Image (cartoon, rainbow, N blue to C red):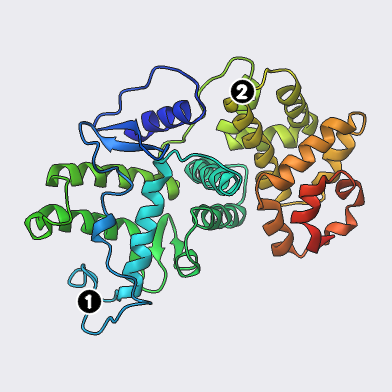
Amino acid sequence: MELDALYHNYLNLKFGRGLPLLKTGRFEYALCEDGSTELFLVGRKNESFTEWTSDLRPADPHYTDTTGRAPVLASRFGQLDVYGEQVLDYLLLTINATTSIVPIHPYNVMNDRMKHYCFFQLAQWAHLSMLSDEQKTGLRDFFFWFYLYAHPVNGETLDAFSFRGPDLIHTQTGIRVQDYFEAYHDHYAHQHTAYNDCLTLSPQEIEACCRLTLQMLEAVEGRSSRLKLPPEAGLEPALRLINQADEFLAAYTRNRSEVFGCMQDTLTDVPSTPYREHIISMLLHNYVCYILYFDFDQIVELVEFFRDDPTLCRVIVNRMFTETIFIQKILWQNRIALHNYANVTALFDENAREIYREFL
């Protein structure tokens, strides 16, 4: 599957691992003038995979006169209006942009981390067997909400989609996103001459983009093969718990000290590299999303385990609370009073206290 190789290359380039890039068929990464690294069709450096649709997007219907204007695909989807068309276009951009490697700075680091963590977890979703159907459904909605939120999208797009069984749908119309994306690419591939001023890709190249977009949609819907973080010497136990969420849950159920011990070893035994830091973040946020999401009281167990190493405990707690706002949403959803966990908040640094001041 092309997505597996692209994901390997994405991680390789993003974290400067310096490994040989895998062959990926029609696509390759290239460095752009703005410092980002984007995916391009081989031999095409003038139109990235993320931006090939940019000149096709209609004007924002909230700020323009829409009188007499119909969606481009109105004949195929009669129930769709121009507002629904806009959020579907935004979703297409959000999914395609998951391949982008953007320069990281203090204002985007959290969103970048959350979006790509959630994309990875959505691709694991169908392989979960340790959770009930109700738990899986709630967790998928949680991951998908953050996947959109962290892009970031506007509020209308954030609330426009839901899952119906395995399918992602536009909630208001019931349109399957897969059907819309297929029709969208088919329209521009077959009506290519009518859009010569807006399109630089050939019909065959549009079809290649369609195939990759649909692979990424399958990952979001949990229908793809499971994505995996590639091997790294000394981090095998952590990668086993990250690449198989069921194994993480099973290990915690079997003996939670196995998971806590893995956190300890990963944070203390391996020399720091960007990829190592990514693996640590993934491991810590697995604890947040697969354990604390369902039972926030489990954080007491973590603090108790690390009571003899308060410095390391403080590092773990502050990373879990400040690298993402997953815990913030968990607190809101479950109306949890954080001030009741004084042994946890006592470990907060200044940044954590600022982020969670309304909960303290």
Q: At 59% across and 53% down in the image, what residue appears?
A: 139
Residue behind mark 1: 70
Please state if 273 lies on the left or on the right of 44 as rendered.
Answer: right
Please state if 139 lies on the left or on the right of 305 as rendered.
Answer: left
Residue 30, by quadrant, is: top left
In this rendering, the answer to whether 84 lies above or below 284 is below
Query: In which quadrant of the rendered image does the N terminus lie?
Result: top left
The residue at the far front in this view is 33
Query: In which quadrant of the rendered image does the C terminus lie?
Result: bottom right
Residue behind mark 2: 273
**Residue 191 in the image, given as x and y percentages of width and height:** 10, 58
Of helix, strand and loop, which one carries label 1?
loop
Earlier residue among tags 2 and 1: 1
Viewer can see residue 217: no
**Residue 270 in the image, given as x and y percentages of width and height:** 69, 18
Viewer can see residue 39: yes
Of helix, strand and loop, which one carries label 2?
loop
In this rendering, the answer to whether 24 lies above or below 68 is above
Q: At 76% across and 48% down in the image, what residue appears?
A: 351
Q: Nearer the viewer, residue 158 or 16?
A: 16
Mark 2, other Cα within 10 Å: few <14 / some 14–19 / many ≥20: few
Q: Nearer the viewer, residue 16 or 237?
A: 16
Please state if 74 lies on the left or on the right of 91 as rendered.
Answer: left
Q: Give the residue type that dot 2 points to.
A: Thr
Q: Cα distance, mark 2 to mark 1?
A: 51 Å
The residue at the far left in this view is 193
In this rendering, the answer to whether 264 lies above or below 158 is above
Q: Are marks 2 and 1 in contact (CB under 8 Å)?
A: no
Please state if 239 lies on the left or on the right of 218 as rendered.
Answer: right
Q: Which mark is residue 210?
A: none
